[in-house]
Amino acid sequence: MTQAKSPFNVVFVLFDNVTQLDFTGPAQFLCRMPEAKVHVAAASLDPVMTDVGFGIMPTVTFEDCPQADLLCLPGGLGVAPALSDVALIAFVRAQASAAQWVTSVCTGAFILGRAGLLQGRRATTHWGYTSLLPMVGALHEDARTVFDGNVVTAGGVTSGIDFALTIIAHLHGEDVARSLQLNFEYDPAPPFAGGTPANSPPHIVQTMQTRFYDARSAEMEAALVATA
């Protein structure tokens, strides 16, 4: 009799005001990875409200979550308050200690950092927050996906899809990743040039910086100082 293979447990850690695409993007791809089983972990089984206003139902709590083979922290405006969530940080630290892969998307990197998992490592995050990475001991690398040992960080929001495909290729080969890329017709062709500060018009970058990211990065910095 052939013994059934153990699933490859992918665990996304959620908190209120998480950026929805940070985890639903990579989850859509990772759930199709061979032997993968995706879990959505939160403090309770109550719905977790995303930045879109949708309630996501967790599948497991921090107490009954299986050991992650791949642990992923998405980002969002909920990261700053989550940095002081003792139970969440303890869960991340405990899961990371035995996970094969410890990963983040966007500002989820700061939760990894708060758990002491980015010290001395190369990492990335959303462009609006990269200057804060040294506060958690990380060295910023300007890339959509950064590998440093078993720690993988992705840049802002849509970078999570690139991260998922890169992980799938690493674990199962490029053909599997390419097949999933084709399955989901992932062939980005945005209607406008831009998407990073380097290739966006300077006035657009300045507007976004002053309208949103000056205040948001200040809030994140204050939260990092308060929880250091």
Image: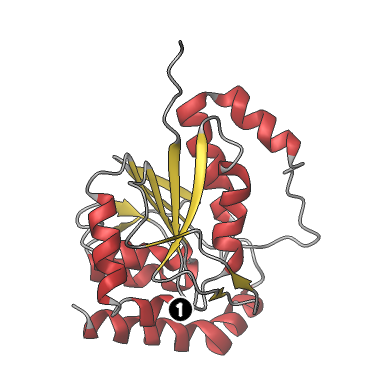
Q: Nearer the viewer, residue 128 or 59?
A: 59
- Residue 155 lies, in percent from the top left, at 49, 58
- Residue 123 lies, in percent from the top left, at 35, 54
Q: Residue at x 35, y 63 (%)?
A: 62
Q: Residue at x 38, y 80 (%)?
A: 80
Q: How many marks?
A: 1
| Secondary structure at numbered mark 1 | loop
Query: Vertical placement of 41 versus 15: above or below?
Result: above
Quick one: label 1, few (<14), some, or many (20+) residues within 10 Å?
A: many
Tell me the kind of residue under disc 1: Gly
Q: Residue at x 49, y 78 (%)?
A: 16
The residue furthest right is 191
Q: Residue at x 53, y 82 (%)?
A: 209
Query: Vertical placement of 78 versus 155: above or below?
Result: below
* Figure quadrant of the C terminus: bottom left
- Residue 85 lies, in percent from the top left, at 30, 77
Q: Nearer the viewer, residue 79 or 159?
A: 79
- Residue 196 lies, in percent from the top left, at 59, 63
In which image quadrant can residue 178 be found? top right
The residue furthest top is 1
In this image, 195 relative to 169: left or right?
A: right
Q: Nearer the viewer, residue 225 or 180?
A: 180
- From the image, tell me which residue sits under label 1: 78
Query: Vertical placement of 152 versus 124: above or below?
Result: above
